Image: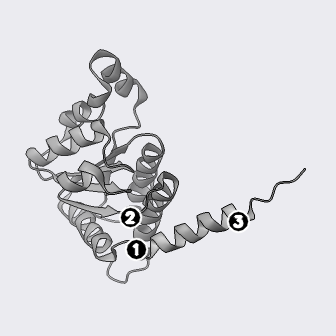
Amino acid sequence: MAHNFIPNIQHYFQTLKATIDKINVEDLNNLMNLLLSAQDQGKQVFVFGNGGSAATASHYVCDFNKGLSYGKEKRFKFICLNDNLPTMMAYANDMSYDDIFWEPLKNYFQPGDFVIGISGSGNSKNVLKAVEWAGENGGVTIGLTGYDGGKLKQIAHHGVHIPVNDMQITEDLHMVLDHCIMSVLTNHPDY
């Protein structure tokens, strides 16, 4: 027997479309300018998250380091802190899961570097710990959040908030931000 999921599908898409219209495009414009500043200054951009946000962080690295850097004299220097599973598991096992981003960040971070924490809830302890440390040590911190933004929205210097109480739509739109930035920059005459 076939099920009729059409009303649920329509609801999801309607919520997704309505949420897109609520994203603060000035915040996204600011993020784009910050990232161009990082590229221009040769600063590293650390990005990380848990679960689906970890996959998004990895995707950002691919799109910025290859997609927006190929053929350019000045390149992006994105580093994903959740891409090295052995390092993450070592810190989680020997110290705490809350240290999996903060500790490796301390190995590479230089004052003036950029740190992007991705957390749908805005309350992932390991993301908060790394963002807070970077902010206290001369970093430019950015939070990508959903729901009410949680603590990450409060402590990050900059951010783009997805105003919806839905993790899947939040994660969808964090990925859309990446592709929007890629598309806009790739097609901008000054880039």
Marks 1 & 3, CB-CB < 8 Å contact: no
The residue wearing badge 1 is 22
As shown in the figure, which amino acid type bears the numbered disc 2?
Pro
Q: Residue at x 40, y 65 (%)?
A: 71
Q: Is residue 20 above or below residue 167?
A: below
The residue wearing badge 3 is 7
The residue wearing badge 2 is 163
Number of other residues with Cα within 10 Å of mark 3, as a class: few under 14, some 14 to 19, many 20 or more:
few
Which of 25/81 is in front? 25
Number of other residues with Cα within 10 Å of mark 2, as a class: few under 14, some 14 to 19, many 20 or more:
some
Q: Position of residue 62 (x, y in %)?
A: 44, 52
Q: Is residue 57 above or below residue 27?
A: above
Which of 106/159 is in front? 159
Q: Position of residue 109 (x, y in %)?
A: 18, 42
**Residue at mark 2 to residue at mark 1: CA–CA distance:** 7 Å
**Residue at mark 3 to residue at mark 2: CA–CA distance:** 23 Å
**Of tags 1 and 3, which is closer to the observer?**
3
Can you see residue 124?
yes
As shown in the figure, which amino acid type bears the numbered disc 3?
Pro
Q: Residue at x 58, y 71 (%)?
A: 14
**Residue at mark 1 to residue at mark 3: CA–CA distance:** 23 Å
Earlier sequence position, callout 2 versus callout 1: 1
Q: Position of residue 21 (x, y in %)?
A: 44, 76
As shown in the figure, which amino acid type bears the numbered disc 1?
Lys
Residue 86 appears left or right of 102 = right
Can you see residue 45?
no
Q: Quadrant of residue 94?
A: top left
Marks 2 & 1, CB-CB < 8 Å contact: yes
